[in-house]
């Protein structure tokens, strides 16, 4: 909560998006470390209810940062680990809210899975995908 109040419009995800170079229309130089730190910062927000609420309020920004066009350009192990961790946390949040964003995020996860080579990251992306699919199926039954 204190962090959010210090940032314009309480938009922590947008700040991390800009500082991490996680946007297609930003002119921030390509930097794996900045991307990793931004993804880790977002993933860490899930540890507190206030952080989950911030993510929920800006879920479309987070979904954009996870898109293949953005997260797919970072190939370093640490950046991929941070983005796959965020993917799991974000999938759980979306599934718990039964949000329409989850359908688009499921497609993003499929694309990220196609390109993943690291076993740990692959596992996390699969867990995120499984979380969304299991919650989606249970809502239609």
Image (tube, grey):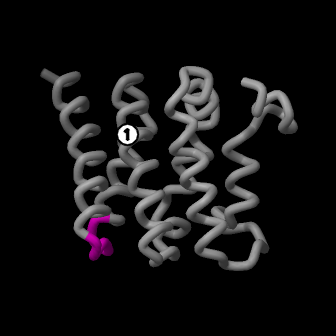
Q: Relative to 80, is 112 on the left or the right?
A: left
Q: Residue at x 63, y 56 (%)?
A: 38
Residue 3 horizontal side relative to residue 53, left or right: right
- Front position in the image: 82 or 68: 82
Q: Is residue 8 above or below residue 50?
A: below
Which element carries disc 1, helix, strand or loop? helix
- Residue 70 percent across, percent down from the top left: 55, 67
In this rendering, is residue 51 above or below 11? above
Q: Position of residue 72 (x, y in %)?
A: 46, 71
Quadrant occupied by the C terminus: top left
Where, by quadrant of the figure, is residue 100 drawn? top left
**Numbered-mark total:** 1
Q: Which residue: 54% across, 21% down?
A: 49
Which quadrant does the N terminus fall into? top right
Residue 22 in percent (x, y) is at: 64, 63
Is residue 12 left or right of 32 when viewed as pictured? right
For residue 116: magenta? yes
| Image coordinates for residue 63, horizontal then vertical, percent | 52, 48
Looking at the image, residue 49 sits to the left or right of residue 84; the answer is: right
Q: Residue at x 82, y 28 (%)?
A: 5
Residue position marked by numbered label 1 in the rendering: 91
Quarter holding residue 111 = bottom left
Q: Residues within 10 Å of mark 1 (few under 14, many from 20)?
A: many
Question: Where, by quadrant of the figure, is residue 137 drawn?
Answer: top left
Q: What's the magenta region?
A: 113-118
Reply yes or no: does residue 67 show up in magenta: no
């Amino acid at each position: 909560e204190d962090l959010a109040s210090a940032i314009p419009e309480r938009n922590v995800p947008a700040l991390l998006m800009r500082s991490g170079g996680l946007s297609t229309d930003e002119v921030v130089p390509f930097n794996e470390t900045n991307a990793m730190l931004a993804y880790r910062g977002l993933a860490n927000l899930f540890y507190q209810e206030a952080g989950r609420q911030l993510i929920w309020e800006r879920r479309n920004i987070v979904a954009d940062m996870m898109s293949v066009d953005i997260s797919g350009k970072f190939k370093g192990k640490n950046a991929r680990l941070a983005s796959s961790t965020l993917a799991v946390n974000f999938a759980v949040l979306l599934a718990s809210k039964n949000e329409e964003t989850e359908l688009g995020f499921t497609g993003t996860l499929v694309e990220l899975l196609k390109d993943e080579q690291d076993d740990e990251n692959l596992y996390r992306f699969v867990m995120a995908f499984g979380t969304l699919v299991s919650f989606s199926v249970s809502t239609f039954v």
